[in-house]
Structures are given as C-alpha cells and as structure tokens.
C-alpha cells in the first residue's frame, strides 16, 4: 500500500452566487511511495494547488479518497506540513517562535520550544537569526522559516506549493539544493507543486504532468538522473524538451478551451 494515495479523485467547485460549477479535478489516481519527491507540474489553473490542498486536508474531494499512511484525510493535520509561495509568518514573533508555533499551541514552555526548534533552524541554515523578526528577513530566509516550521510539524510528509516561485534565480538554486539535502537527511516524502520544468527536473524522483483543466494526470515520469542534477547534460535536456512539449500542448489546449467557452457565452449576433 502506497504512503500517499489519491484514489480516483474528482473535485468540483460550486459558486452559489453565480450559479456556476467548475470541474477542477477529473478522476485523478496517484500513489506516492515513502521517500519519493513528486513534482506536480502543469499549465496554470489545471488543478495543482487543488490536488495538493486535498492532501493537506484544506479541501475535500467531491468523490474519491485521499489517504496518508493508510488513514483517510478528513482535515488538516499536524502530520502534514505545508509550505506556500508566501511564508505567511507571524510578524510579531521572532524566527524561532514562528518555527515552533505549533508547540506553543500544545502548551510547551519557551525553553522546550527553543530546544525543539534548534535542529530545524540549523537544517535550514538560519543559525544566528533565531531572534530576528520576519520584517528583517529576505524572501529566501522567510521561506527557510516556512520550511523549518513544516519540518518541525513532521519531517515525514512535506507539501509544497510553488515555494520558490517568488525568489530570485540565485536564491532559488540555493534553496533547491538545500531542499534536496533536507529531503535526504530526514527521509521525507515530498509533494511539490511547480510550474517550472527545470525545478521539477532538478528536484523530483518523479514528475506528474497534469492536463489542462479539468486536471488529470497525463504522464508520470520517473527521473533517475544522478544528483546533483546536471542541467547541462544531454539526458536532462532530452527530458526537459519532452516535458516542455507536453506542457506547451496542454497550455495551448487550455487557451482553445477558454476561447471556446468565451464564444459559447456570447449573445448570438443578430443579422
Ligand atoms: N475555492 C475555489 N472555488 C472555485 N473555484 C476554484 C477554487 N479553487 C480553485 N478553483 C478553480 O479550480 C481550477 C484549478 O485551480 P488551481 O488548483 O488553483 O490551479 P493551479 O494551482 O494548477 O494553477 C481553476 O479553474 C480555479 O479557478
Ligand atoms: Mg496553484
């Protein structure tokens, strides 16, 4: 039995005000084994975040079931840490207290929380910045805090939704490298949403390419390139070309579907 199981997931959003329905996910089945690093990739609006949010427990499938460690997901849980594009830190708390916030809710003392946070502060290379406040951090440092916070919750399962998308190119490369080191050190299972083909190929053990909306899994590719990944190698670029072609095709289909929808909603012209 796989560690994370998405069993025949359908997700439909209802807008009661407009009276519309959006089919976001259309019968997705995806199994993730322990210690895999799965990158979900696909055109904008294809349902990547929706799928991840169902694993996190923020959204419920319309039909189908999500299981983690054999347990059905009924809501958010401390067993699944989530990292978003924005770190969403509490500006009034220093770095260490942001990282250990979950333990504050559990009633642990300041000393206990500081002790628990330290290994994760070290893992994300923030030693020396424990007492800094979020306003004093760069974008990359803020994301490190977000990652440490997720690791402290449970390093076994980390869910990430375009966590490096807002960072500059150099910081992004450093963070990708460090995330791979963390994933290896903690034997984590990671589901990582990205729209960057390079990022997916640098990070993943597998890439799940989604179709345009309603999202389905179009292709699952195992990446067994050596690490650190050599972005200049022929193998890397051969895979990159293939993934880019598939995504370009899906993005084109999404544009066609959007213009068809738009045309279908126009009043019939009078002649
Ligand atoms: N809460 C929501 N209510 C209504 N529609 C939603 C909601 N969340 C997402 N959607 C729709 O579902 C589709 C997939 O969205 P999303 O998962 O955010 O895509 P992605 O992350 O791949 O860009 C989009 O058409 C989006 O508009
Ligand atoms: Mg998204």
Image: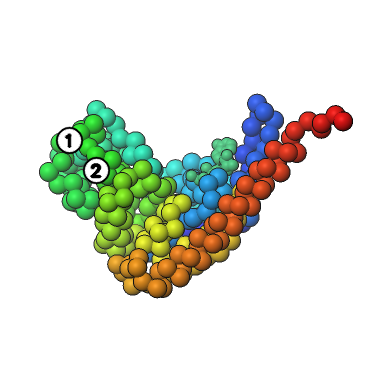
Q: Is residue 85 visible?
A: yes
Q: Name the quarter where the C terminus is drawn.
A: top right
Do the numbered discs 2 and 1 sit on residues whose CB atoms are within 8 Å?
A: yes
Determine whether, in the image, residue 132 is placed left or right of residue 186: left
- Marks 2 and 1, Cα distance to the nearest angstrom? 11 Å
Q: Does 92 appear above or below 7?
A: above
| The image quarter in which residue 156 lies | bottom left
**Circle 1 sits in a helix, a strand or a loop, which is it?**
loop
Residue under numbered circle 2: 141
**Within-10-Å neighbours for mark 1: few <14, some 14–19, many 20+:** some
Which residue is located at x 54 percent, y 57 percent? 247
- Pick out the residue farthest to the right: 271
Place of residue 268 in the rendered image (x, y in percent of width and height, measured from the top left): 81, 32
How would you rate the neighbour count of disc 2 (Cα within 10 Å): few for under 14, some for 14-19, many for 20 or more?
many
- Residue 34 relative to residue 103: left or right: right
Instruction: Please state if 263 lies on the left or on the right of 133 as rendered.
Output: right
Across and down, in percent, residue 89 comes to 30, 35
Please tell me whether mark 2 sits on a helix, a strand or a loop: helix
**Mark 2 or mark 1, whichever is nearer to me:** 2
Placement of 262 over or under 26, stated as above or below: above
Residue at x-position 29% and y-position 55%? 173
Q: Is residue 119 above or below residue 145?
A: below
Horizontal arrangement in the rendering, residue 194 relative to residue 121 (left or right): right
């Amino acid at each position: 039995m796989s560690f994370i199981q998405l069993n025949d997931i359908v997700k439909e959003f209802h807008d009661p005000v407009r009276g519309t329905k959006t089919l976001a996910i259309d019968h997705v089945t995806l199994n993730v084994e322990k210690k895999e690093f799965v990158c979900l990739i696909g055109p904008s609006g294809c349902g990547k975040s929706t799928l991840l949010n169902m694993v996190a427990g923020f959204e419920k499938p319309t039909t189908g079931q999500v299981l983690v460690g054999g347990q059905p997901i009924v809501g958010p849980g401390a067993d699944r840490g989530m990292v978003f594009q924005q770190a969403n830190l509490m500006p009034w708390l220093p770095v260490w207290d942001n990282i250990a916030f979950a333990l504050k809710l559990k009633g642990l003392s300041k000393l206990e929380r500081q002790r628990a946070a330290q290994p994760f502060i070290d893992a994300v290379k923030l030693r020396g910045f424990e007492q800094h406040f979020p306003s004093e951090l760069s974008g990359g440092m803020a994301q490190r805090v977000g990652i440490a916070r997720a690791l402290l919750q449970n390093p076994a399962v980390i869910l990430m939704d375009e966590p490096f998308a807002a960072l500059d190119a150099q910081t992004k490369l450093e963070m990708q490298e460090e995330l791979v080191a963390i994933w290896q050190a903690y034997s984590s299972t990671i589901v990582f949403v990205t729209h960057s083909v390079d990022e997916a190929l640098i990070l993943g053990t597998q890439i799940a390419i989604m179709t345009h909306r309603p999202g389905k899994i179009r292709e699952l590719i195992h990446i067994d390139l050596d690490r650190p990944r050599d972005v200049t190698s022929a193998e890397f670029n051969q895979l990159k070309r293939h993934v880019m072609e598939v995504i370009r095709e899906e993005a084109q289909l999404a544009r066609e579907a959007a213009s068809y929808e738009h045309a279908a909603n126009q009043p019939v012209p009078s002649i």
